[in-house]
Image (cartoon, rainbow, N blue to C red):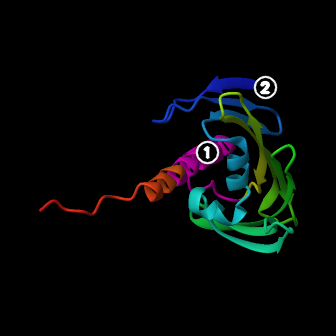
C-alpha cells in the first residue's frame, strides 16, 4: 500500500513528493541546479557529515579511480546514543545515479540501502529521485532529529537541498567579493 502527500514547503518553495511503500520511501523534488552538478555534489560522500545533521562522522576506506568513496563507515546521532554503520557505494555516471547498501551487517542497523538519481530537465534544472530503506534494531532509541526519525528520506533530501543552495551562495560570493574600497 502506497500513500502520497505533500509537505509544507521550506522557504525556497521546494515542491517535494513523498511516496511511502511497504519497504522503502521515494522522495522526488525538482532542483534548480544542473543534474551533473547535483550528481557530482551528492557523490562527495566525505561531505555527508557537513550537511546531514544526524551523521557525525564518515571514514572512507576505499575509493574508485575518480576518488569517490566506495566503502564508508558512518557514525550517526541517536537520542542518548550513537550508531555506527558501514555502506558500499556504486556510481553510474551515464544515468547520474548513486546507490548504496550495507557493507557489513551490524546488530544496530538491520538495513540501510537506497539510491539518488538526478534526471536532467529542459529548464536546466533536474529532478532528484531519492529512494531509502533503513531499519534500525528495535532496541535502539530514535534518531536525534524528529523529522529524520519520522521521515528519514525526506529529511535527507531537505538537508541535501539546503547544503546545495548554501554551496551555490558561497560560490557566488567568491565570484563577487565585497568592495573594500572607501570613498575619501
Q: Residues within 10 Å of mark 1 (few under 14, many from 20)?
A: many
Disc number for residue 52: none
Residue name at image x 79 percent, y 66 percent: 69
In percent of width and height, residue 60 lies at 76, 72
* Closer mark to the observer between disc 1 and disc 2: 1
Disc number for residue 155: 1
Q: Could you tell me if the residues under marks 1 and 2 are in contact, i.e. CB atoms within 8 Å?
A: no
Residue name at image x 84 percent, y 51 percent: 99
Magenta-colored segment: predominant secondary structure: helix
In percent of width and height, residue 37 lies at 68, 49
Give the magenta range. Answer: 140-167
Residue 140: quadrant of the picture: bottom right
Classify mark 2: helix, strand or loop: loop
Spatial CA distance of label 1 from label 2 is 19 Å
Of the two numbered discs 1 and 2 on the same chain, state the one appearing first in sequence. Answer: 2
The question of residue 72 being in magenta is answered with: no
The question of residue 147 being in magenta is answered with: yes
- Comparing 171 with 127, the one in front is 171
Residue 115 vertical position relative to residue 79 in the rendered view, above or below? above
Which of the image's four quarters has the C terminus?
Answer: bottom left
- Comparing 15 with 164, the one in front is 164
Residue corresponding to mark 2: 2
Residue 27: quadrant of the picture: top right
In percent of width and height, residue 92 lies at 87, 50
Amino acid at each position: 500500500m502506497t500513500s502520497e502527500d505533500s509537505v509544507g514547503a521550506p522557504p525556497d518553495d521546494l515542491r517535494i513528493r513523498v511516496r511511502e511503500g511497504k519497504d522503502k520511501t521515494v522522495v522526488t523534488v525538482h532542483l534548480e541546479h544542473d543534474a551533473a552538478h547535483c550528481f557530482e555534489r551528492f557523490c562527495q560522500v566525505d561531505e555527508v557529515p557537513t550537511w546531514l545533521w544526524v551523521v557525525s562522522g564518515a571514514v572512507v576506506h576505499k575509493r574508485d579511480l575518480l576518488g569517490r568513496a566506495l566503502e564508508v563507515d558512518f557514525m550517526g546521532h541517536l537520542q542518548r546514543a550513537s550508531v555506527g554503520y558501514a555502506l558500499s557505494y556504486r556510481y553510474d555516471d551515464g544515468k547520474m545515479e548513486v546507490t548504496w547498501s550495507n557493507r557489513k551487517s551490524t546488530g544496530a542497523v538491520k538495513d540501510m540501502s537506497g539510491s539518488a538519481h538526478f534526471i536532467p530537465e529542459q529548464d536546466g534544472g533536474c529532478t532528484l529521485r531519492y529512494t531509502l530503506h533503513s531499519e534500525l534494531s528495535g532496541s535502539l532509541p530514535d534518531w536525534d532529529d524528529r523529522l529524520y526519525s519520522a521521515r528519514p528520506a525526506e529529511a535527507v533530501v531537505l538537508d541535501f537541498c539546503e547544503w546545495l543552495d548554501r554551496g551555490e551562495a558561497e560560490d557566488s560570493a567568491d565570484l563577487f567579493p565585497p568592495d573594500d574600497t572607501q570613498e575619501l
